[in-house]
Amino acid sequence: MIKVTNVHKNFKEVKAVNGIDLHIQPGQYVALLGPNGAGKTTLVEMIEGLQHPDVGEIQIMEKRWKDHQEELHRIIGLSLQETRFVDKLSVLETLRLFASFYGLGGKRIQEILDLVNLEEKKKSFVVNLSGGQRQRLALGIALLNEPEILLLDEPTTGLDPTARREIWDILKSLKSSNNTTMILTTHYMDEAAYLCDKIVIMDSGKILAEGTLEQLLSKHKKGEVISFETNGPIPPDQLPGGDKIIKSVIEPVANKGEIIIEDLVSYLPSFLEFIKNQNLVLTSLECRKMTLDDLFIAMTGRHLNQ
């Protein structure tokens, strides 16, 4: 469905996208997961034709933007992190406006109102909608033309958990009812894991890893995680069992850290003994399986939301 080949995009001295190859199959839900500045939005903007690669090529259904702009615009739906509407138009009037661009009538508008659960708000001015309702309206507009490809750029950023879940439910129901291909940019691990078949982890304009959640964790993880806080600074260069530590991130000023180790059961006793010998007290201790954030830490040394 979408083929990205050796794509580069620079903005002055910033390498926003730095040699990306990506293949997306029909009907896949794909998450571009990474922190702010990873290159996710720039990549999506090139896929949707708003930006053009400096180097490389992007094909959508084996077509290029240069030669097939009108056709590609008709098969793509967009929903951005923030969409500007006319405040004094109602929800229904807004949908009618955008539906007119595609020559669509009342039947499709009603389907969208039902899909994004805005029937009760259809006569409300857009200015009076909550953040979650505005994002559902934006998603509804993106779906008006029944797009074959749906591009969502951090659609739930800034929303409360309930509003985020409402967006998720709409996308889940969409996936079960048709064969839409979706690309979702996000820095929320749970969002990527819940919605998407394929997760692409990005940082500094490059792809670090890609696959299903299970593939990523089984391929790249080699252990488990100890997260802790103490009543004093931890000397990071004195942690026990150095050969068993895959990655450690210690914050001496905050008196906390995380250690990714090969085997929790065998490592934990020596770690507890180390804490005791340092005359420290654990104020918090959590032992768990790796998550996508842990995987990102192992690859980059920092959290996804930093």
Image: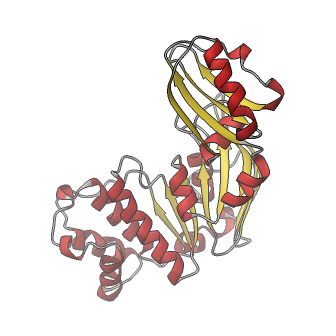
Which residue is found at the position 24% from the left and 58% from the top?
A: 86
Specify whether 49 is left or right of 261: left
Which residue is found at the position 68% from the left and 16% from the top?
A: 236
292 or 227, nearer to the observer: 227
Q: Is residue 57 visible?
A: no
In the rendered image, which quarter is residue 54 located in?
top right
Specify whether 3 is left or right of 167: right
Rendered-image quadrant of the N terminus: bottom right
Which residue is found at the position 72% from the left and 19% from the top?
A: 239
**Where residue 206 appears, x then y in whole percent?**
72, 42
16 or 12, nearer to the observer: 16
**Where residue 116 appears, x then y in whole percent?**
34, 72
Image position of 90 with respect to 230: above or below: below
92 or 246, nearer to the observer: 246
**Where residue 221 appears, x then y in whole percent?**
74, 46
159 or 9, nearer to the observer: 159
Given the current orientation, which residue lies at the most extreme bottom position? 107
Image position of 57 with respect to 8: above or below: below
Q: Is residue 285 visible?
A: yes
Image position of 179 with respect to 155: above or below: below
Image position of 150 with respect to 274: above or below: below
